[in-house]
Image (cartoon, rainbow, N blue to C red):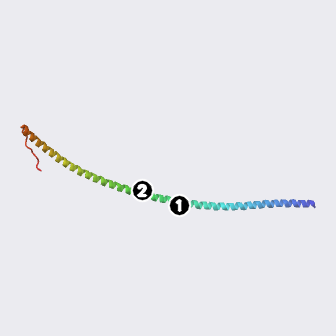
């Protein structure tokens, strides 16, 4: 019986080993399934976060385009207003310059007429002093 007992112990040890290996495989398979589920959850969270970030980025891009276009429109308005003001200032300066030029021409003509009159008087005085005959003035009526 002792041999039978040895065989029984051997079978019991082999059965225990097989049971242990099967238990390990079941544990590993369960953990693998749990890890797969966690990975699927993490992937779903990642997809959700990625989609949220894409949507936020698209909104930010749209806001940026809107702000850029608004700034461009403001810039055009400011540039046109400055251009108009510059044109007005240039027209005013030209008008002022024309008035000043006309006034100076008038003053210049008056000064030239006075100098011509003085020259004629001086010529008459010299004519009297030295006995030279000077033609009478032909002054334009004023």
At mark 1, the secondary structure is: helix
Residue 39 appears at what percent x and percent y? Answer: 65, 60
The quadrant where residue 40 appears: bottom right
Residue 83, by quadrant, is bottom left
- In the depicted structure, whether residue 130 falls above or below residue 39: above
- Near mark 1 (Cα within 10 A), the count class, few <14, some 14-19 or many ≥20, is few
Mark 2 surroundings: few (<14), some (14-19) or many (≥20) residues within 10 A: few
Are the residues at dot 2 and dot 1 in contact (C-beta closer than 8 Å)?
A: no
Q: Quadrant of residue 136?
A: top left
| Residue 88 or residue 23, whichever sits in front | 88
Name which residue lies at 40% across and 58% down: 74
Position of 3 compared to 129: left or right?
A: right
Q: Residue furthest front?
A: 129
Residue identifier under label 1 = 56
Residue placed at 86% from the left, 60% from the top?
11
Depth check, front residue: 18 or 78:
78
Identify the image quadrant of the N terminus. Answer: bottom right
107 left or right of 46 in image:
left
Q: Secondary structure at mark 2?
A: helix
Total count of labels: 2
Percent from the top left, x then y, of residue 31?
Answer: 71, 61
131 and 20: which one is in front?
131
Q: Which mark is residue 72?
A: 2
Name the residue at 64% across, 62% down.
41
Horizontal relation, residue 124 to residue 109: left or right: left
Query: First in sequence: mark 2 or mark 1?
Result: 1
- Which label sits on residue 37? none
| Disc 2 from disc 1: Cα separation | 24 Å
Spot occupied by residue 97 in the image (x, y as percentages of width and height)? 25, 50
Place of residue 142 in the rendered image (x, y in percent of width and height, measured from the top left): 12, 50
């Amino acid at each position: 019986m002792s041999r039978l007992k040895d065989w029984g112990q051997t079978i019991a040890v082999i059965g225990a080993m097989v049971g242990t290996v099967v238990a390990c495989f079941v544990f590993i398979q369960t953990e693998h399934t749990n890890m797969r589920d966690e990975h699927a959850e993490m992937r779903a969270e990642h997809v959700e976060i990625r989609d949220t970030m894409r949507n936020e980025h698209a909104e930010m891009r749209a806001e940026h385009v809107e702000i850029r276009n608004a700034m461009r429109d403001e810039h055009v308005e400011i540039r046109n207003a400055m251009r108009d003001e510059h044109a007005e200032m240039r027209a005013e300066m030209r008008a002022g310059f024309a008035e000043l030029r006309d006034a100076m021409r008038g003053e210049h003509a008056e000064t030239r007429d006075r100098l011509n009159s003085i020259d004629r008087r001086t010529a008459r005085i010299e004519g009297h002093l030295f006995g030279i005959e000077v033609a009478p003035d032909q002054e334009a009526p004023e």
